[in-house]
Image (cartoon, grey):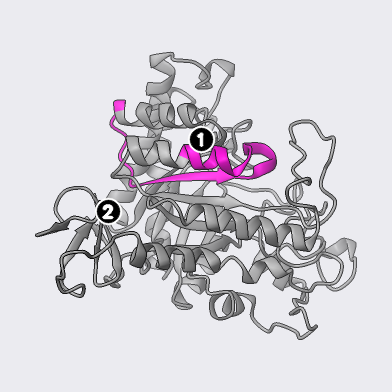
């Protein structure tokens, strides 16, 4: 399958994706939260601004099974909510990434809670059936209502498995039966994706980014259990996943061991104020990137530079860029969108003005464009518009074997 610069009907439009997880944007809009430029000019439509001014071309939205906003205001994304936002994304001409959590609440490396409606029968067979039927039902609904996703995450940060009944279900060791249980779930979800939205790219998303060997081991488990997927999805937050050198090692390892699998950074973010220094589990990275708007911008610039060095990275998504205070222009207990500021968004929670980092994310696209043109030296005098080169600078007759190729200044990936 070729991933190139040409738009194909029903397929992701972009060879390189830049965007954000904007799952809370409709909630902020519901309570009329103002969004301003740095000069204080009101932004009438944030999605349009992200596309036209920030050059984003793809958006990610999470989906919970039966979320309860009374538990957490951020648990708003049921299927109807996601359909409406997904259609808006598609109608705007952007790619749409759907992030299945397969839970009523946050799914991550420490939480993979079985949805309440699936708990009547938690045998492996019943849960596998639920994975398939639920995924299929959701995708059919989205497809029928103008919100067909271009990318589908089968699970969110599933580094240690999913649908945990007990501690023994967690993939903390090499137990074959535990991994088989987990990968059967992934395969069931992937089967539904292929049947309903065959052009969508399947993403397996983990956060084992800080350790190259652990990350590669995870995806070797996917291979050993014949899990069907297209893209490796990674979370990268430096205060949890170490420095850029560690990220670089992981990306290089994945490129060597899985040359047919592009990588997308599907979550990243950095603090512009109130870094939680001293909190358990956080590495204090403020010595490298201060917890200021300038520090946040510097992180984005450094990250984009690093990602530009890796041919296999084809996507970058900022997590919760739309964070913008608690809801509305001023505090209102009846219109709470966020019950605790995270301080990693791309708008300032106090002033509602953009942070400078938002305009630096497009450096990712610039870095990738430069790599496409410059990473191969045309040395044989052939016509650069028609000749094909592999990433060793060798001219080839066709793009057939898996790998990355250049033709006419464009990058193509065969897998």
Could you say whether the residue bearing mark 1 is in a helix, strand or loop? loop
Query: Is residue 397 at least partly visible in the picture?
Result: yes
**Which residue corresponds to mark 1?**
158
* Front residue (pair 342, 74): 342
User: Residue 332, how many percent across, how many down?
Assistant: 89, 66
Query: Hey, which quadrant is residue 409 in on the image?
Result: bottom left
Q: Would residue 79 be seen by someone viewing this image from the given angle?
A: no
Looking at the picture, how far across and down is residue 1, in whole percent? Answer: 21, 55
Q: Nearer the viewer, mark 2 or mark 1?
A: 2
Residue under the point 71% across and 70% down: 356
Q: Which residue is mark 2?
A: 391
How many labels, in total? 2
Q: Is residue 239 magenta?
A: yes
Bin the neighbour count of mark 1 within 10 Å (Cα to Cα): few under 14, some 14-19, many 20 and up: many
Q: Please, what secondary structure does the residue beneath circle 2 have?
A: loop
In the rendered image, residue 237, in percent from the top left (x then y), is placed at 64, 45
In the image, taking residue 359 as reference, residue 381 lies left or right, namely left
Report how far apart the C-alphas of labels 2 and 1 lie in the structure: 32 Å
Write down the region rendered in magenta.
224-250
Residue positioned 61% across, 79% down in the render: 49
Q: Residue furthest toward the left?
A: 397
Label 2 Cα neighbours within 10 Å, binned few <14 / some 14-19 / many ≥20: some
State yes or no: residue 228 in magenta.
yes
Rendered residue at 43%/29% (across/down)? 218
Residue 17 vertical placement versus 242 (above, below): below
Quadrant of the rendered structure where residue 397 is?
bottom left
Residue at image coords 48%, 69%? 366
- In the rendered structure, the answer to whether residue 85 lies left or right of residue 256 reads right
Up-down: is 321 above or below 240? below
């Amino acid at each position: 399958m070729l991933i190139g610069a040409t738009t194909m009907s029903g397929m992701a439009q972009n060879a390189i994706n830049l965007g954000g997880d904007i799952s809370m944007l409709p909630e902020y809009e519901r309570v009329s939260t103002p969004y301003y430029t740095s000069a204080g000019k009101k932004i009438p439509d944030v999605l349009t601004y992200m596309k036209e001014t920030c050059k984003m071309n793809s958006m990610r939205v999470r989906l919970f099974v039966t979320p309860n906003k009374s538990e957490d205001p951020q648990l708003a994304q049921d299927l109807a909510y996601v359909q409406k936002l997904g259609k808006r994304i598609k109608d705007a001409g952007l790619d749409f990434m759907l992030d299945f959590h397969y839970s009523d609440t946050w799914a991550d490396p420490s939480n993979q809670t079985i949805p309440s409606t699936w708990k009547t029968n938690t045998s492996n067979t019943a849960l596998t059936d639920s994975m398939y039927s639920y995924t299929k039902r959701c995708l059919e609904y989205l497809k029928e209502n103008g919100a067909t996703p271009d990318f589908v995450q089968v699970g969110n940060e599933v580094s240690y498995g999913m649908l945990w009944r007990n501690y023994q279900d967690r993939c903390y060791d090499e137990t074959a039966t535990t991994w088989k249980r987990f990968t059967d779930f992934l395969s069931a979800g992937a089967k539904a994706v292929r049947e309903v939205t065959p052009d969508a790219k399947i993403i397996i998303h983990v956060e084992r980014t800080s350790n190259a060997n652990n990350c590669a081991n995870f995806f070797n488990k996917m291979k050993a259990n014949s899990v069907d997927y297209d893209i490796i999805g990674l979370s990268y937050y430096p205060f949890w996943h170490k420095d850029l050198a560690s990220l670089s090692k992981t990306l290089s390892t994945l490129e060597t061991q899985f040359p047919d699998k592009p990588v997308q950074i599907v979550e990243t973010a950095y603090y512009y104020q109130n870094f939680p220094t001293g909190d358990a589990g956080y590495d204090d990275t403020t010595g490298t990137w201060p917890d200021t708007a300038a520090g946040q911008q510097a992180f984005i610039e450094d990250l984009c530079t690093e990602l530009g060095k890796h041919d296999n990275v084809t996507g970058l998504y900022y997590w919760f860029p739309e964070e913008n205070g608690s809801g509305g222009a001023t505090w209102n207990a009846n219109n709470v969108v966020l019950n605790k500021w995270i301080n990693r968004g791309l708008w300032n929670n106090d002033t509602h003005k953009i942070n400078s980092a938002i305009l630096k994310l497009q450096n990712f696209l610039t870095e990738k464009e430069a790599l496409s043109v410059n990473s191969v030296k045309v040395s044989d005098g052939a016509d650069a518009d028609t000749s094909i080169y592999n990433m060793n600078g060798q001219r080839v007759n066709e793009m057939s074997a898996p790998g990355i190729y250049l033709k006419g200044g464009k990058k193509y990936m065969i897998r």
